[in-house]
Image: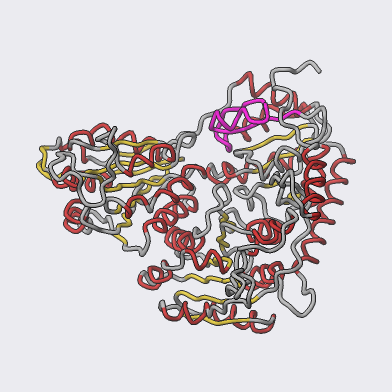
Amino acid sequence: MRMTTAQALVRYLAAQHSEQDGVQQRLIPGVWAIFGHGNVGGLGQALEEWGARLDLPTYRPQNEQAMVHLAAAYAKHRRRRATFACTASIGPGSLNMLTAAAGATINRLPVLLLPSDYFANRVPDPVLQQLEDGSQHDSSVNDAFRPVSRFFSRISRPEQLLSALPQAMRVLTDPADTGCAVLSLPEDVQVEAWDWPEEFFLPNCWHLRRPPPEASQLAQAAAWIAHSERPLLLAGGGVRYSEAEAALLQLAERFGIPVCESQAGRGALPWNHPLNLGPLGANGGSAANQLARETDLLISVGCRLGDFVTASKSALQNPQLRVININVAAQDAVKLQGLPLLADAREGLRALAGALGPAWAGTSATYRAECAALKAEWDGQVQALRAPAGQTLTQSEVIGLVNAAFGGGATVVCAAGSMPGDLLKLWRPEDPLAYHVEYGFSCMGYEIPAGLGVALADPGREVVVMVGDGSYLMLNSELVTAVAEHLKLTVVVVDNHGFGSILGLQRSLGSPSFNNELRYRTAEGRLSGDPVPVDFAAHARSLGAWAASAGTREQLAAALEEARRQGGVSVVAVRVGQGRPLPSWGWWDVPVAEHSGQSEVQRARERYLQERARQRPYLPPAGEVDR
């Protein structure tokens, strides 16, 4: 079958499916594209000629970084069983995708990137926007994708797709090795024709595997649990991706084991379940962090165990602590020197429940009563933090009002700043897909594109994006895309005049406000003048959205009610004060200057050293069992 490289690529993608538990779906249901001279005659031509015939629609975003965020969010909401392909032109267009590519790989989310590249024939050399390197004639800006992708291949001849595309599909469907897959496409190769074997375009289905745990490791894990007095389950993102929520609930209820959550695992159990003790770590709550300090056995399920969930390795203080890691990825299963139970989260939890069987009655009545008391105390604290406090609206109160307006079934989307930590504590999700916060990369600008991704992945679900004004100003252009695609989406912009999260962190380190607030420059040359007024509602209306401003509780409640009645994109801008940060029940290692003439910095350094003394940089290894 004679066709160009780009046409063959499009036809191949349209024939790929994923399958898990007998359910099949399109692996790549569409392509996001911004065309330039590097891809308009190749992929652009192929998508126009073949896309509609193959039911492979092309979407037009406004920003290359945003479309990759969108694809990653779509994949997350679809539990990593489908994703989008993204293509951009040579040079800045392709390089704009780099930040979001790193986010996808760090968060273990599958995305397929098709950046354009220089001429493989090297006749136009250097081509417009090509990077020149005097010592490496074959380098380009696309080589920057190598360290942030799980698979990278530069397609310098058409027939290389025959081996490269299956490898890219493998990465997109591998639960342990997924992330960003990149096929770098020279612009001349895209339009070059070749005689392709018909078999290359036959429908193909990629099975998403569910590996069970090894019998010996399973027996060891069951023995540890049966001899534990204070076990604690930690739900990570792997619970969501493997649909292990029911298995987690059954294990927890059958044996009376409390459950805490990471950012990615939030919603694995409904917030009001008696055994859900809430979030763990630096942004965690009082109940989970108190249990973690004293637990003798942490059972981590599908968790990356980053520094936030471990409170920079200060959360776990019991000298007799043991760790079991149920994880499909070997690099995660050995973290904290834990016993590696290499398995799909659902299959690992089911096997563990079976291995414990009738030989263990579960945790003691005393431990269960303690957990119940901590749960009640934590729920009361959350209620108090969401309640009104003074005349000025606070971020925590806004979260409570938005949650009350949309309910626990709407998906909340967020990414960076202080908002994710506040949402982790205060938002009350009622199902596993009702909480969508990107916090592996904490990438400002993710929020609005991700809202589009969730809306496309789950058209019947209400989606509410919570975003700070600083992040909104970085990447708001996809509001236009949401309007063009007739998506239903509500964006709540919390306006505190700048980067309020980092301002709070800056002050906690002893420094006065500097370069974080959105203020006019004074005659003395400092950015400490009056706040710069930004009319976010007027801006959103100019992009085609319905919009309203709110400065009081009553105005916010009315605006949210009207936003829910709107049929398209709605933006509610709400002004909040910069005070009243939420209490902290965990620690995060952010170094403080060792030498300074500022007394507040010196005191902050003393506090920092006290907290750092509680770190446990290395736990006893899992193999050392006779203690």
Residue in front for this viewpoint, 214 or 475: 475
In this rendering, the answer to whether 456 lies above or below 156 is: below
Q: Is residue 323 magenta?
A: yes
Q: Nearer the viewer, residue 54 or 491?
A: 491
Tell whether 487 sits left or right of 385.
left
Q: Is residue 39 above or below residue 320?
A: below
For the residue pair 458 and 476, the one nearer the viewer reads as 476
**Residue range (magenta):** 322-347
Judged left or right of residue 346, residue 133 is left
Colour scheme employed for the rendering of this structure: secondary structure
Q: Is residue 380 shown above or below 549? A: above
User: Which quadrant: the N terminus?
Assistant: top left
Answer with left or right where residue 153 lies relative to residue 233.
left
Residue at 57%, 77% in the rendered image = 532
Q: Position of residue 195 (x, y in %)?
A: 10, 37
Whether residue 428 is visible: no
Looking at this view, name the residue that lies furthest to the front: 524
Where residue 53 appears, as percent x and y from the top left, is: 20, 56
Picture residue at 54% right of the left edge, 78% below the top: 534
Spot the residue most to the right. Answer: 366
- Residue 622 at x, y = what percent? 70, 22
Quadrant assignment for the C terminus: top right
Whether residue 60 is visible here, answered yes or no, is yes
Q: Residue at x 43, y 57 (%)?
A: 70
Residue 79 x %, y %: 49, 48
